[in-house]
Image (cartoon, grey):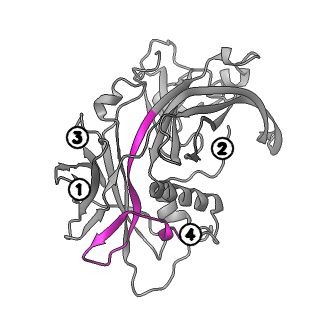
Amino acid sequence: MMNRGGVIFSILVLLGLVLINACVENFKFETKSEASVLVIESFISDQSYNDLLTQPLDPRYFQVKLSSTSRVTNILDQAVTDAEVSLIDESNEHWDYSEDEDGIYRLYFETFRAETDKQYKLRIVLSDGKVYESTYEGLPADVSSGGIVLEEKTIRDYRVVSGESRIVDVDGLAIKLKTARNNTDQELIYNRWDFETTYGFVARLLPTQTDPNYKCWVTEELYYNDFVIAKETLGDAEHEMFFFDSKDENLHEGFSVLIRHQMMNELNYQFWEDLDNQKKQADVFAPPPYNLISNLSAVDHDGEVYGYFGVVREKYYRWTFSPDMLSYPVVYPEDLKNSCNIPRPPFSCYDCRYVNLVSRSRVTNNKPIWWDK
């Protein structure tokens, strides 16, 4: 699969682990002070929970994720609990977040969305009384989309052939998003896209397909690129999102990708651009993550903080694979059909809920409500 075996990093891995400890060895640095650094991940958008009920996706509440990491040693990130987290607009109206998982605070207001011509800031009070705030942020200019564009093509990429990694021809589809400007007052539009892939998985050794644990749906956040960013000037544009391999082993029980498009301000874009550059370097010579731009700061103390509180516009697009999108037939490999016909097959052959999961993925045996739409 394209990019799945490549360098995939989440923001916390980048901020807390990879760029601090790029080597395999577990290095630690002697120091008298190993002050922890607060890491904040959060955004709000113009799409409320209720707005998303009409979209082909699982709706979400806005959330803030708080963790701490060490700038000196490679200590795993720790969830920051028992904080008071609130959203404040310029008229001093407050919305309070609720902590329902360690370090995860959600804004349980179904109708709340960021509004045009309003400014918002994030305020966090830790259990020790230390306060952190963002600057006030507002929604950026908008663009409208022309929709998803498919291009059948062949690329050269690494694949394992007879136990060896080789560069071979790979047939498939380039999935692109076409955008059209509907605002000419702003010189540049700043875009970020990320992806959530869902595919079917079946327990092949169950005697009946009516068993509730015969078919599951696996959702992975990092199946393709972590994210894609691009600036837009005046006029229409096409942006390639990812490449779909027509021999992907997971396409045969249903395969769908949710594309989330976020439009943001210039400084927020710079944060993601710098993060993307550091991800691409990913070695001991990469600049330290605490050089990333941020709109968050400590209030009346000298604590350090990483992250960016974004106020963005969002649009969602779902692409679901269908064999008629290709000019050639899709073959269901016999070795995949017979993958459970081996001595001591894995338990997932009898119960789909036991499928092997990778980082930032989940499985359910309840068919998503949007699956057949």
- Mark drawn on residue 3: 2
Is residue 257 visible in the rendered structure shown here? Answer: no
Q: How far is the residue under mark 1 from the one under mark 3?
A: 12 Å
Q: Is residue 336 above or below residue 67?
A: above
Q: Looking at this view, is 62 or 309 the one in front?
A: 309
Of discs 4 and 2, which sits in the foreground? 2
Label 1 sits on residue: 85
- Mark drawn on residue 21: 4
* Residue that appears at 66% across and 43% down: 3
Is 41 situated left or right of 240 in this image? left
The tag earlier along the polypeptide, 2 or 3, is: 2
Q: Position of residue 159 (x, y in %)?
A: 77, 40
Q: Position of residue 51 (x, y in %)?
A: 32, 29
Q: How far is the residue under mark 4 from the one under mark 1?
A: 31 Å
The tag earlier along the polypeptide, 4 or 2, is: 2
Of discs 2 and 3, which sits in the foreground? 3
Within 10 Å of disc 1 (Cα), the crowding (few <14, some 14-19, many 20+) is: many
